[in-house]
Image (cartoon, grey):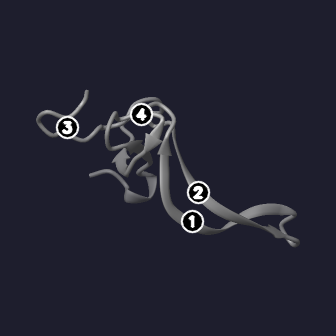
Amino acid sequence: MSDPAQTRYAHICHICGSDHVTRDAWAIWDVAAQDWVIETLFDHIHCHHCLGPTRAEQVVLTSSITFAAPDRMEGAPP
């Protein structure tokens, strides 16, 4: 069995399967780290392949460049 600590994930569009998705968030300046850190994530997710709102699905990466995409519902776009 694989080590769960080494399991890596991707988030993909539930419509087309693209991993080119973004999510609205607020970032705050962390003085100690001298970097922006995410403070709040919002529900809106956008697919840059479909060019519209989507729901992100988390999938397990099976290699550094591929992932196990979920099965598509019958009649859904490829």
Disc 2 versus disc 4: nearer the observer: 2
Q: Secondary structure at mark 2?
A: strand
As measured in the structure, the alpha-carbon distance from the residue carrying label 4 to the one carrying label 1 is 20 Å
Q: Which residue is mark 4?
A: 18
Q: Which residue is mark 1?
A: 41
- For the residues bearing labels 3 and 2, Cβ distance under 8 angstroms: no
- For the residues bearing labels 2 and 4, Cβ distance under 8 angstroms: no
In this figure, what is the number of numbered marks?
4
Viewer-closest of 35 and 3: 35
Q: Which mark is residue 74?
A: none
As measured in the structure, the alpha-carbon distance from the residue carrying label 3 to the one carrying label 2 is 26 Å
As measured in the structure, the alpha-carbon distance from the residue carrying label 2 to the one carrying label 4 is 18 Å
Expressed as whole percent of the image width and height from the top left, the position of residue 25 reads 62, 61
Quadrant assignment for the C terminus: top left
Viewer-closest of 3 and 23: 23
As measured in the structure, the alpha-carbon distance from the residue carrying label 4 to the one carrying label 3 is 13 Å
